[in-house]
C-alpha cells in the first residue's frame, strides 16, 4: 500500500465530487405496502427535484408509476409529506404544479380527481368501502390564513371534497379502522406545533362519510401524539410523550394504557405528514423503531406479554416503517451505508435491498465514520452531536497542523441529525475538513425535556451548544481552534448567523436560506409556522424586544468574520429579503461577504446544478478564508471586501 501523501488539510483530492453529491443520489421517502408490492417516492435532483412514485412489484421489477410531466408533491403546511396513497393498485396523489389530486390505475395515465381551485391535499387514505379518499385539505380560497380540515373526496371525481372534520387550526393522520366503521385523527391549534401538543380524536363514520359521536382519546396542549394506527382487530394504537418520552400506547376498552415504558423515542416531530415508525405483524405483534442515544433500533413488541425484542440489523437510522404480516419494509441507513429501501422477512430475519439512494459506492478509506459525542455546555448540562474526523486514505495532514472544523447546525430547529452516511458531509471530511453535526438543545431524539431546552431560548441555547461543541473538540486537540467555521440551512442558518454575530468563536460561516430578522419572520411566514416563534422566542408583538434582541440584523456592528450566503429566490418560508438585509449590512461594514441566489429554488435547493454550485462555492470560500489550496479548480466566487 502506498504511503499517504502529506498535504495541508482542506487541500486533499477526493473522489467524492460535488457532481456526485448533487446528482448521484435520490432522496427516498414515503414508503407504502400494497399487497405484495412496495411503493416509495424518489426525489430526483437531476430532474429538478421532481418527486416520482416508484413501485417494486412482487417479481422484483422496479418501475416508475408517476409519468413525466407530473410531480407527486403536496404543499400543505409548505413542507408537505403524505403526497400519495395506494390501495389494490389504485394510486391517488397530489400534483405539485396545480395541487390537484389525481387518481391512477397502475399502467394507466393519471386522471384529475379534484377541480382547479386554490386547494391543497395531503395525508390521505383510500376508503374502498365508500369509494372515498379521506385526507387533509388546506383551503386558500378565502381572505386571511388558509383553512384546514379533513375531507372525503369522491374517487369518481368531480368534487373538491366534503368536510367531515373541521373547526381547529390543523389536522393530520386521518386513519380508518380495519372495518371502516371509525375514523381517528390528530388536531392542534395555534400556538402549538404538533410536537408541543396535539389531540387524538375518534368518531364513528356513517356510510355517506359523516363523522358522528366524536370523542377525544388523548392529548392536550402539553402532550404530543404521533401516528395513530388501528390494529387488525380494531384496537387504536398511538405514540405519546405524556411521560417525557414518545412511547407506545393503546386505547382498549375505553382505557389508555402504555405498552412498554422506556426512555427512548418511538415518535418524531411531525414536520411532514405520513411518518410511520411502527406497524402490525399480527393482532398481538408490533414491529417498531425507536431512537436511543443517537441511534435507531428495530424491534418487535408482543402486546400480550409486553416483551420487546431487538432485531439485529446493520442500520442505525430507520424511518418509514411499514408492516404486512411477516413482511417488513423501511428506509434504512448507517454511518457506512446511504439510505436504502429495505425489505425484511420477519420469520427468517433475512433482508434485501430494493433500492439504494445511491448506486455508486466509494471505498471505505475515503469515508469518515460518525462518532456520537456528548460534551459539556451551559448551566452544567450536556449536549449531543456527531463528530466526523478528516479522513482520506490517500492523504495525511502535516504533523504540526490540525484540521479545520466545520460545525453544522441542522434546520427545524425542532429536528435532529443522524449517523447515516451523507456524502454532503463526506465531501468535506474527505478533503481534510472535520465536521461536527450538532444535535443542540431543542433537537428531537433525546426526550421532551431536551426538546424543550429551546423554549424561549432560540438563538441562545442552540448557539451555545454549537460553540461549546467546537471548543470541546479544539481543547481535545482534534481540530484547529483557529479555523472553526459554522454552516446551516433555514433555522440552522439562523443559528449560524447568531453565532457569527453574538459570539467570537468562529472565523467564517455559511448561511443557507437562513433567518436574520425574527420580526420579519413573525410577520411574513406561512400558517404552519406562523406561531412557532411564540414558544421559541415569546408572543409577538408583546415581546417584540426579544425578537429585536435575538435578530442578527440589528447587531451587525458585532460581525467580525467573513460569511457566504445562499438563497432561493422563490422561498416562501424565509423570503430573500432576509438574506439581502444581512448582505447589505456586511457590505456596509466592509466585511468579506459572498451572496449567491438561485432562480426557481424554494426553501431548500433541489436542482442538481444548484446543489453542485453551492458546495463548490462554499469550499472555494473556505479555501480563501483559511488559506489552503484546492486540489482541483472550481468555478470562482465573487467575495467582496476580501
Image (cartoon, rainbow, N blue to C red):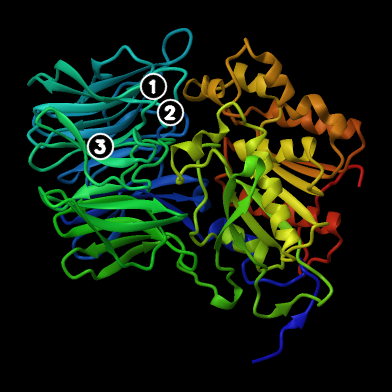
Task: Report x, y in % for residue 622.
Answer: 79, 55
The one of 366 and 65 positioned closer to us in this rendering:
366
Report, in whole angstroms, how far the alpha carbon at label 3 lies from the one at label 1.
17 Å
Choose the circle earlier in sequence order: 2 or 1: 2
Residue under numbered circle 2: 196
Task: Report x, y in % for residue 83.
Answer: 35, 37
Badge 3 element: strand
Task: Report x, y in % for residue 478.
Answer: 71, 66
Q: Is residue 363 visible?
A: no
**Vertical comparison of 400 with 78: above or below:** below
Horizontally, residue 128 falls left or right of residue 582, namely left
Task: Give me the residue at 63% from left, 72% from top.
Answer: 15
The one of 616 and 270 positioned closer to us in this rendering:
270
**Vertical comparison of 461 with 150: above or below:** below
**Vertical comparison of 305 with 241: above or below:** below
Task: Give me the residue at 57% from left, 33% from top.
Answer: 454
Residue under numbered circle 1: 221
Amino acid at each position: 500500500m502506498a504511503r499517504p501523501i502529506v498535504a495541508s488539510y482542506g487541500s486533499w483530492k477526493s473522489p467524492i465530487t460535488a457532481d456526485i453529491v448533487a446528482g448521484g443520489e435520490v432522496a427516498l421517502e414515503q414508503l407504502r405496502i400494497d399487497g405484495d408490492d412496495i411503493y416509495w417516492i424518489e426525489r430526483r435532483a437531476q430532474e429538478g427535484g421532481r418527486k416520482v412514485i416508484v413501485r417494486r412489484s412482487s417479481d422484483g421489477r422496479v418501475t416508475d408509476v408517476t409519468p413525466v410531466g407530473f410531480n407527486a408533491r403536496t404543499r400543505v403546511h409548505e413542507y408537505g409529506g403524505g403526497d400519495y396513497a395506494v390501495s389494490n393498485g389504485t394510486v391517488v396523489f397530489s400534483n405539485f404544479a396545480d395541487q390537484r389530486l389525481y387518481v391512477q390505475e397502475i399502467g394507466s395515465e393519471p386522471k384529475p380527481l379534484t377541480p382547479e381551485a386554490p386547494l391543497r391535499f395531503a395525508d390521505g387514505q383510500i376508503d374502498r368501502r365508500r369509494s372515498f379518499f379521506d385526507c387533509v385539505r388546506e383551503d386558500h380560497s378565502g381572505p386571511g390564513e388558509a383553512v384546514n380540515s379533513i375531507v372525503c373526496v369522491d374517487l369518481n371525481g368531480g368534487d373538491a371534497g366534503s368536510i367531515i372534520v373541521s373547526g381547529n387550526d390543523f389536522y393530520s393522520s386521518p386513519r380508518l379502522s380495519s372495518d371502516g366503521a371509525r375514523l381517528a385523527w390528530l388536531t392542534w391549534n395555534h400556538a402549538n406545533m404538533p410536537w408541543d401538543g396535539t389531540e387524538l380524536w375518534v368518531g364513528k363514520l356513517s356510510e355517506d362519510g359523516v363523522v358522528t359521536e366524536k370523542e377525544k382519546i388523548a392529548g392536550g396542549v402539553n402532550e404530543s401524539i404521533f401516528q395513530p394506527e388501528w390494529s387488525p382487530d380494531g384496537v387504536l394504537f398511538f405514540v405519546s410523550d405524556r411521560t417525557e418520552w414518545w412511547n407506545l400506547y393503546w386505547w382498549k376498552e375505553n382505557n389508555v394504557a402504555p405498552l412498554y415504558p422506556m426512555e427512548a423515542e418511538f415518535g418524531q416531530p411531525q414536520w411532514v405528514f405520513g411518518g410511520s415508525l411502527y406497524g402490525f405483524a399480527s393482532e398481538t405483534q408490533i414491529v417498531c423503531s425507536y431512537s436511543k442515544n443517537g441511534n435507531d433500533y428495530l424491534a418487535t413488541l408482543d402486546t400480550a406479554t409486553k416483551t420487546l425484542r431487538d432485531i439485529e440489523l446493520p442500520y442505525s437510522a430507520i424511518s418509514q416503517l411499514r408492516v404486512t404480516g411477516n413482511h417488513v419494509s423501511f428506509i434504512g441507513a448507517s454511518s457506512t451505508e446511504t439510505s436504502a429501501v429495505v425489505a425484511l422477512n420477519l420469520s427468517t430475519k433475512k433482508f434485501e435491498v430494493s433500492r439504494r439512494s445511491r448506486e455508486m459506492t466509494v471505498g471505505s478509506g475515503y469515508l469518515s465514520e460518525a462518532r456520537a459525542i456528548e460534551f459539556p455546555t451551559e448551566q452544567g448540562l450536556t449536549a449531543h452531536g456527531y463528530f466526523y474526523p478528516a479522513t482520506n486514505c490517500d492523504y495525511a495532514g502535516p504533523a504540526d497542523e490540525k484540521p479545520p472544523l466545520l460545525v453544522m447546525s441542522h434546520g427545524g430547529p425542532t429536528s435532529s441529525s443522524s449517523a447515516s452516511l451523507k456524502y454532503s458531509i463526506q465531501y468535506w471530511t474527505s478533503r481534510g475538513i472535520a465536521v461536527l453535526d450538532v444535535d443542540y438543545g431543542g433537537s428531537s431524539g433525546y426526550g421532551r425535556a431536551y426538546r424543550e431546552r429551546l423554549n424561549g431560548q432560540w438563538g441562545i441555547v442552540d448557539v451555545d451548544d454549537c460553540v461549546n461543541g467546537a471548543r470541546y473538540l479544539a481543547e481535545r486537540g482534534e481540530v484547529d481552534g483557529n479555523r472553526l467555521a459554522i454552516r446551516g440551512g433555514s433555522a440552522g442558518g439562523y443559528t449560524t448567523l447568531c453565532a457569527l454575530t453574538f459570539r467570537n468563536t468562529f472565523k467564517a460561516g455559511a448561511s443557507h436560506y437562513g433567518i436574520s430578522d425574527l420580526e420579519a419572520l413573525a410577520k411574513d411566514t406561512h400558517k404552519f409556522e406562523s406561531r412557532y416563534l411564540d414558544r421559541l422566542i415569546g408572543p409577538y408583538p408583546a415581546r417584540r424586544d426579544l425578537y429585536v434582541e435575538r435578530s442578527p440584523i440589528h447587531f451587525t456592528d458585532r460581525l467580525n468574520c467573513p460569511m457566504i450566503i445562499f438563497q432561493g429566490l422563490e422561498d416562501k418560508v424565509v423570503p430573500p429579503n432576509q438574506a439581502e438585509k444581512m448582505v447589505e449590512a456586511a457590505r456596509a461594514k466592509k466585511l468579506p461577504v459572498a451572496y449567491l441566489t438561485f432562480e426557481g429554488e424554494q426553501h431548500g435547493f433541489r436542482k442538481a446544478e444548484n446543489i453542485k454550485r453551492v458546495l463548490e462555492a462554499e469550499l472555494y470560500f473556505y479555501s480563501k478564508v483559511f488559506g489552503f489550496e484546492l486540489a482541483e479548480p472550481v468555478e470562482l466566487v465573487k467575495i467582496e471586501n476580501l
